[in-house]
Amino acid sequence: PQQAQARYGPSGVLAVNQWQEVLAGAKNLPETEQITRINDFFNRRITFLDDIEIWGKTDYWATPLETLGRGQGDCEDFSIAKYVSLRSLGVPLDKLRLVYVRAQIGGVSQAHMVLAYYPSPRAEPLILDNLIGDIRPASRRNDLFPVFSFNSEGLWVGSGPSEKAAGRATARLSRWRDLIARMRAEGIE
């Protein structure tokens, strides 16, 4: 809250406090309820806006503090905030992936990011998205075409659980590395 106050004023503090309340309230719930609460919180709390309008840059990955402080974010910001929130609740890393997709939006194919939650290693993922409020299995999201996915452990091509790319492929994701460094500076691990 101190960083929120210094950077975003009372509205930033309120947003961070609300986030902390949601996290505290979800701490002991089953994972399926945790993902629902986190998805709903960010989808209701954050207004979608393109990076150029928020940050004056064509592509910027905001930390959850930045997203909450501004009250605005693009698809990456929604997905990252949900990922960080679920990790802080103890959802295992191997159950979460940030997924770059091609989304059919209004008949146009656009780059988009969602968060995938895998209830078990070979299970069909559930998709947390800012475009659609409810959480749906990937098979019910015919509007999304996976390109690659990643988390703090690795990078996968496509959407299958066994398609892990070699080595520390996430090192190639400079925005991801930059985001992790900025979150650590904010006290988020």
Image (tube, rainbow, N blue to C red):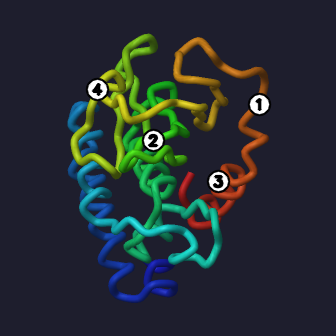
Marked residue nearer the N-terminal end (2 or 1): 2
Q: Nearer the viewer, residue 98 or 143?
A: 143
The first of marks 2 and 3 along the sequence is 2
Tags 4 and 1 in contact by the CB under 8 Å rule?
A: no
Circle 4 crowding by C-alpha within 10 Å: few under 14, some 14–19, many from 20: few
Distance, label 3 to label 1, CA atoms, is 15 Å
Place of residue 160 in the rendered image (x, y in percent of width and height, measured from the top left): 53, 16
- Graded by Cα atoms within 10 Å as few (under 14), some (14 to 19) or many (20 or more), the crowding at tag 1 reads few
The residue wearing badge 3 is: 180
Q: Quadrant of residue 34?
A: top left
Q: On residue 168, which mark appears?
A: 1
- Seen in the picture, residue 24 relative to 36 is either above or below; the reply is below
What's the residue type where badge 4 is placed? Arg
Q: Which residue is mark 2?
A: 103
Q: Nearer the viewer, mark 2 or mark 1?
A: 2
Q: Is residue 103 above or below residue 16?
A: above
The residue type indicated by label 1 comes to Arg
Determine whether label 3 and label 1 are within 8 Å by CB: no
Numbered disc 3: secondary structure: helix
Instruction: Tell me if 20 is positioned left or right of 29 in this view.
Output: right
Q: Is 133 situated left or right of 106 in this image?
A: left
Residue shown at 64% from the left, 72% from the top:
57
Depth check, mark 3 against mark 4: the one in front is 4
- Mark drawn on residue 140: 4
How far apart, in angstroms, are the residues tagged by discs 2 and 3? 26 Å
Identify the residue at horizontal 40%, vertical 69% (top origin): 68
Task: Residue at the far front: name it.
Answer: 107
- Name the element at disc 1: loop
- How far apart marks 2 and 1 lie (CA) works out to 27 Å
